[in-house]
Amino acid sequence: MFHSNHQSFADRRSDSANAKKALLERFKARPGTDDPIMQQRRAERQAVAEARAIREAEKAAARAEAERLALIERARLEEEERQAELAREAARQAEQARRDAERPRKVLLEAVQYAQMRAAGKRRR
C-alpha cells in the first residue's frame, strides 16, 4: 500500500490503534438501557409498533369483509345467471312443445291439401 506522506509501519500501527480507541470511546459514550432518553425512545417505538399492528389488523378485517361481500355478490350473480338459464331452457322447451303440437295439424293440413289437389287434377281429365 503506497502512502503519499511516507509513513512508517509504526506510524500506521499507532494510527490504527488510535482509531480503534476512538471507536471504543464513542461506543462507551452511548447511553445505556436504563437511561431515561433510551426508555422514552423504546416506549415511542413500542407505541408506533402497536399502532401499526392495529392498522394492519383493521386493514385485514376490511379486506376480509370486502372479500366476503365480493363472494356474496358473485354468488348472487351466479344465481341470477342460473335462473336466467333455467328461464331460457323453459322457453326453449315451451317453443319445442308448441312446434311438436303444431306438427300433426300441419301434416293433416298438407294431407288434406294434397288430397284436394289430386281430386282437382282428376276432375280436369
Image (tube, rainbow, N blue to C red):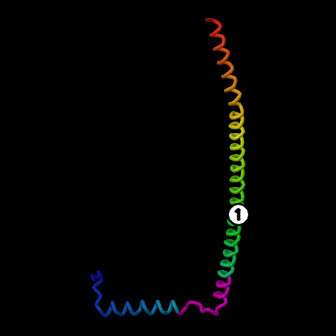
Tell me the residue that label 1 is attached to. 68
Left or right: 26 with respect to 51? left
Out of 31 and 117, give the one closest to the viewer: 117
Q: Secondary structure at mark 1?
A: helix
Out of 28 and 92, give the one closest to the viewer: 92
Which image quarter: residue 10? Answer: bottom left
Residue 103 image offset from top left, x and y in percent = 68, 30
Residue 41 image offset from top left, x and y in percent = 65, 83
Instruction: Identify the residue shown where x is 67% and y is 18%.
Output: 113
Instruction: Identify the residue shown where x is 69% and y is 59%.
Output: 70
122 above or below 60? above
Instruction: Identify the residue shown where x is 67% and y is 77%.
Output: 48
**As drawn, which residue projects farthest toward the top?**
125
Q: Amino acid at mark 1?
A: Arg
User: Does 42 lie within the magenta span?
Assistant: yes
Instruction: Identify the residue shown where x is 67% and y is 90%.
Output: 36
Residue 73 image offset from top left, x and y in percent = 71, 56
Quadrant holding the C terminus: top right
95 above or below 2? above
Start and end of the magenta stretch?
28-43
Residue 30 image offset from top left, x and y in percent = 56, 90
Residue count near mark 1 (Cα–Cα under 10 Å), binned few <14, some 14–19, many ≥20: few
49 above or below 60? below
Left or right: 14 with respect to 6? right
Q: How many marks?
A: 1
Which image quarter: residue 57? Answer: bottom right
User: Does 123 lie within the magenta span?
Assistant: no
Out of 94 and 17, give the one closest to the viewer: 94
Quadrant holding the N terminus: bottom left
